[in-house]
Amino acid sequence: MTEIKWLSDFFPPLKGTAADTPVFVLSGAEPGGQALIMGNTHANEPEGLLAVAIMIENAVVEKGTLYLIPCFNRSASLNTRPGEGYPLYFSVTTPWGKKKFRLGNRDASPLDQWPDPDVYIHYPERQMLSYLDIRNTNRTWPGRKNGLPMEQVTFAAMELLRGNRVDLAIDLHGAETMFPVTNCIVAPEKSMRIATLASLTVKSMEGFENHLESSPEKFRGLSHREIGDYSETLPFLLEAPIPFLDQPTGAKTEQLFLTGRDEFLLSLSRKKKLFVPYDESGWPLDRRVGQHLSVTLEIIRQYSRKNPDRAINLRQVPRYSDLIKNGTGAYFHNPAEAEKDRVVKL
C-alpha cells in the first residue's frame, strides 16, 4: 500500500460525513493501467469487502495502480437489516485468532439520508425507481454533485474514474441462489470480450462456473451500466451465490452466513428451484471470496494482455484454490504484530 485517500479527496463535500470512505492506493514502480475495485456496495454481501481487504493486505503491484475501496457504501456498512434477524457481526478464523467484521445492510442508513422520496427519479436518465433505491449505491450511478448523499458517493467515484483515467472498475456483489443473476460476471457491450475471456479461463483452469450476463440498457443506475456510459472505464460486476440472502431458509445465523448450508435450500435444490449447483456442502464463504479474487485477477490479466501499454501487473494475491485449501482467514495479518500507523479500522 502506497497511500490512503478518502472518497472526499475526489469530491470534497463528502468530507466529515458518514458517506465518506477510505480509498487504499497500491501503485507500482512502473506506470501502467489503473483499476478500481469496490466491496460492500451492498454491505449485506460482504464477500466483496473480504476480497478487497485481502488484496489490500497482500497485493504487491509491480506495474500500474489499484484503487481499493472495501466499504463503498460506508453508511450501509454500519447499518443493519431490520425485521430479518441479521447478526450484527461475523468472524473469520485466522492463524492468530478470530477477525470480526460488521455485517451491514443493502441500503444506507436512514439516519444518514432521510426522508426517502415517494418515487426515486434517477439522474440523469429520469427513470422512476423504488423509493428505497435512493439509498442504494448500485442504483445511483453516475451520481450528481448536488444530489443526496448516496448520489454524491457515486458522483465522487465517477470523479475518481474520470480524473485518473481508470481503465477497469470491478464491483463485487453477492446474490441469492434463487435469483437468476448469480454466480456470474455482468458486463456491458464494451466490456463483454474481456468478461468472456475471464469466464472461460476460470472455468477451464480453475474449475468453477462463472457465466456471463449482459448489462441491461433500459435499467438505469447500475454500476455496470452507468460507469461505461459516462466514462471511458470498462465496468464489471461480479456476483457470488450467498445462500444467507435467500428467503426460504432457516434462522439468519452467523453459521448460515459462513457455511451456506441450509436444509430448506437443499430441498429446493432437489426440486431444481435454484440457479446454482447446491448440495450438502452448501456454498461456503471461502468459495465465494475465492471466486471474487480469481475472477478479478483474471479480468485484470486479460485486459493487460490486450493492452500491454496499460498493463496492471500484481502478485501475491491468493486465488480460488488457495482459499479453498487454506481458508479466507489465512490471508489476514495479525494487527497486534504490525506497526500502529499501518493498522486501519474499517
Image (spheres, helix red, strand yellow):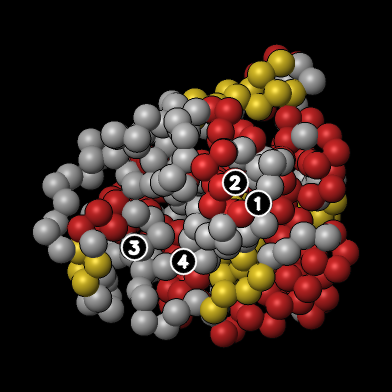
- Residue 4, placed above or below residue 147: above
Counting other residues with Cα less than 10 Å from the Cα at mark 2, is it few (<14), some (14-19), or many (20 or more)?
Answer: many
29 left or right of 19?
A: right
Q: Secondary structure at mark 1?
A: loop
Which of the two labelled residues, at mark 2 and mark 1, occupies the earlier sequence position? 2
Counting other residues with Cα less than 10 Å from the Cα at mark 4, is it few (<14), some (14-19), or many (20 or more)?
Answer: many
Which of the two labelled residues, at mark 4 and mark 1, occupies the earlier sequence position? 4
Q: Is disc 2 in contact with disc 1, using a CB cutoff of under 8 Å?
A: yes
Please tell me whether mark 1 or mark 3 is closer to you in this view: 1
Q: Amino acid at mark 2?
A: Leu
Q: Residue at x 79, y 30 (%)?
A: 330
* Residue 170: percent from left, percent from top: 59, 62
Counting other residues with Cα less than 10 Å from the Cα at mark 1, is it few (<14), some (14-19), or many (20 or more)?
Answer: many
Q: Nearer the viewer, residue 333 or 129?
A: 129
Residue indicated by mark 4: 223
* Disc 3 to disc 4, C-alpha distance: 8 Å
Q: Secondary structure at mark 2?
A: helix
Residue indicated by mark 1: 278
Which of the two labelled residues, at mark 4 and mark 2, occupies the earlier sequence position? 4
